[in-house]
Image: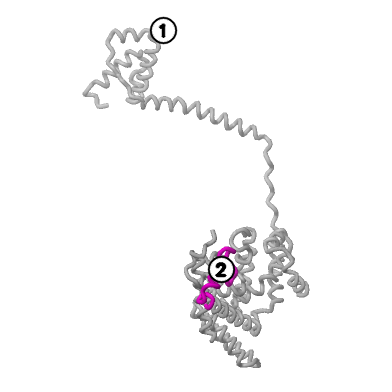
Amino acid sequence: METDLSSQKATTAERGSDDLLIRRLIAGDSHAGDELVVRHGAPLLRYLQRLVGSDHWAEELHQQTWISVLEHLDRFDPSSGGGFKAWLYRIATNKANDYWRSRGREKTATENLGQITEQFADDAGHRLENQEQHEKVRRAVEQLPQNQREIVLMRYYGNLKFVEIAEMLGCPLNTALGRMHKAMLRLKKLME
Amino acid sequence: MKPGLEDYESRQAILLMYLAEELPEADRVEVDRRIAEDASVRIELEALRQMQASIWAGLGDLDRQSRPPVPDSVVNRRVGRLIKDWLKARSEIPAPIPMPRRQMHWIRYGVAVAAMLLIGFFLWPRERSLTEASRPLSITQPDDSTMADNTNTDDATAPADASQNDQVALLSESFGADSAFGDASTGERLAALTDTTNDPTNNQ
């Protein structure tokens, strides 16, 4: 299975677009679904990991996102917005927002702190300076306001266009760009 | 409609779009011109480029050094299984049975026409009487000779008689006096009616 998926990954660029894969998936081709997962599964999981700051919840939300995608696949309109990828990230972001709402920011922050401590213990063999730098980046991302973090992470992990992000978040393009700029300034300051 | 350069709220917004290569060709050329002419734009662009590069590098290092919540192969396998289960469940749902198409479409049209005719048959006289009721009526007190003439049913007086009959019928209907007149002749009915309408003591 893993070998199959790896070989699929190597030829992803040559294969049809996401829309074509979705049409094949709806028609009953499970390989098309596998290919979609290879294309988007891992970056989406990382996106959720950085967005919610919890490995456990990232995994849970990742699963929920794909279930939601499958449930609504028949109603997906490829011509709207940025196509499948933008739709996938929108669902994931909505799931993350539901998560924030249901658990509360404060509770999660406490949980994250516990995880960070665990991470330190797990990675005790790694070089300290690297770890410190990574921790700085992680903390910097986590300290961003959620609306800025979403945009930075969507750009980085989803490689989505600003126009698509703005449409996805339901805000004007200028607002999305303004948030991105503020996030970059803030990250730069926090990472120094 | 895509925004033009003048629609962006700040220079940073334009430069972010420029860096992301999302500007239309004409706008891109214009930004290139500004970069060439204005040193401050050039410096700002370079600062943004470096800032973005360091953030992306930081995130890249973080991903390389920290483990994902689950390995990629596990992610692929898990979601792949989800998809297979979903496809299996879909294939088990029986396809909707198409309703047999009715062959006798002409019956529908025939029934529709008959229904329209029936409706027309019952509604048209009512509509007509309402239209006539809304027309202003001029009732003049007929003298006895005219009354006498009108009781005749010869051809010459027939149209006038018919018109009066209509008026009587309408007025009778309006005053609810139909039953009171019984089978009286037109003249008698009109006389009785005008007596009724002219009588100041009559409450109706």
Query: In terms of image quadrants, where is residue A141?
Result: bottom right
A149 left or right of B79 in image: left
Image coordinates of residue A9 in percent, x first then y, are 73, 72
Q: What residue type is disc 1 on?
A: Asp
Which residue is at a point 57% across and 70% down the rendered structure image?
B32
Residue matched to label 1: B155
Task: Based on the picture, tell me whether residue B32 belongs to the magenta stretch.
Answer: yes
Image coordinates of residue B9 in percent, x first then y, are 47, 68
Please, what is the dominant secondary structure of the magenta stretch? Answer: helix
Residue matched to label 2: A162
How far apart marks 2 and 1 lie (CA) works out to 91 Å
The correct choice, above or below, for B182 with respect to B121 in the image is above
Q: Secondary structure at mark 2?
A: helix
Q: Secondary structure at mark 1?
A: helix
Image coordinates of residue A93 in percent, x first then y, are 56, 70
Query: In terms of image quadrants, where is residue A50?
Result: bottom right
Image quadrant containing the N terminus of chain A: bottom right
Q: What residue type is disc 2 on?
A: Phe
The correct choice, above or below, for B19 with respect to B120 in the image is below
**Residue interval drawn in magenta:** B16-43
Which residue is at a point 36% across and 21% down the rendered structure image?
B179
Describe the colour scheme in one phrase.
Answer: one colour
